[in-house]
Image (cartoon, rainbow, N blue to C red):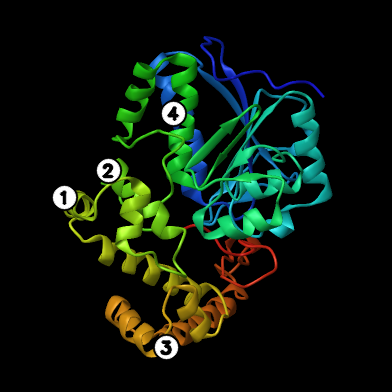
Amino acid sequence: MKSAKNILQPENQPLKTAVLVLDESNTLSFAAAVDPMRAANRLAGRGAFDWDYVTATSEPAMLTSGLSVPGIPLARLQSCELLIVIAGFQLARHATPSLLAGLRRLAAGGTTIAGIDGGPWLMAEAGLLDGHPATTHWEDLDNFASRFPGVQCRNDRFTLSEGRMTSGGATPAIEMMLHIIGSRHGAGFASRVAGLFLYDGPGSTERPQSRLGSSKHSSLTARANALMEAALDDPKPLSEIAEELGTSTRSLQQQFRLRLNTTPQDHYLQLRLAEARRLVTDTDLPIMEVALATGFNSQSSFARAFRTAHDITARELRQSSLATAATSRLAASKPLFSQAPLSQGQNTLRQSGPLPRQSTGSY
């Protein structure tokens, strides 16, 4: 097996890249990978990146938005320096022997493999992440860690290791691409690329994912948020969180007020209720199990908190979600227009399945 070339070092030659796009990938994930490369080429006035689109078969990939992306079949891709794997829904269907073999073949030839959104799942299925740090979307981290015990699962926005990169979603993918650009062409150039998108977020690989998506976190509140998210089923007392962070309860309160305009207690509650809403709509767990999984020992207290937060009861929301899914299934069985049937790639219904994200996505 050939060692992967270090693509994260100063280099003026174009980075030969292949973007593997699978059916039912999210459009934002696709753009997060491609647009930073396009912008870098524009600013450099030359080819900082040279990329091709690749698909699993000879058929174009259909994004969740209905956009079609034609490309060369993976089996015909001979080599590249960087392969970006973009996946979203139906991961079990995409993990075919031929696709996994193609990933292994390129990795064995020294290609750096990067996964975005559902991409890390396919990399792990191919055995390419064993012994490597890796991340995926926060919805799936626990299942990812259980399914792939040989992977060093992390709640980071994106991860880097020798020959491997993974991103938890679209926005961290922008950060990952900016990191590549900065490593090859300098931090100043990467900042100019970021400025084209009005992006001023942090690019640290160690910044954890956040379920509530706030960009206003300080280092202290971000670390507190990570501790809270790791203990949604058994909420930690604020004093214990502060002690683990090496600060006082008062300082923690002040930071949450200053940065997020809320209290740590309310932020913690909102994290738990956001997870409860996801479990109600995306799983078939009994409501009482949802309550226990989000730190409520009483179904009545859970019911009150859920209705206050979401203006609907958990049972009503589940019934509404089931009705919406049934309507969508009916619509998916009908032609999109009078001549053309709705492609399988446009059916993005959430369904439970043995493999997380089999038919669910990050967005």
Amino acid type of the residue tagged 1 in the rendering: Leu
Identify which residue, 285 or 255, lies in the foreground. Answer: 255
The numbered mark at residue 218 is 2
The numbered mark at residue 178 is 4
Give the mark nearer the N terminus: 1 vs 2. Answer: 2
Quarter of the view holding residue 309: bottom left
What residue is at 45 percent from the left and 37 percent from the top?
A: 206
Residue matched to label 1: 258
What residue is at 59 percent from the left and 55 percent from the top?
A: 24
Identify which residue, 209 or 94, lies in the foreground. Answer: 209
Residue matched to label 3: 299
Distance CA(mark 2)–CA(mark 3): 34 Å
Give the mark nearer the N terminus: 2 vs 3. Answer: 2
Name the side, left or right, on which 154 lies relative to 244.
Answer: right
In this view, the mark in front (4 or 2):
2
As helix, strand or loop, the secondary structure at mark 1 comes to helix
Q: Are marks 2 and 3 in contact (CB under 8 Å)?
A: no
When the figure is inspected, residue 72 is found, relative to residue 300, above or below; the finding is above
Residue 332 location (% of width, % of height): 59, 73
As helix, strand or loop, the secondary structure at mark 2 comes to loop
Amino acid type of the residue tagged 2 in the rendering: Ser
Amino acid type of the residue tagged 3 in the rendering: Gln
Distance CA(mark 3)–CA(mark 1): 33 Å
Q: For mark 1, does the 10 Å Cα neighbourhood hold few (<14), some (14 to 19), or many (20 or more) residues?
A: some
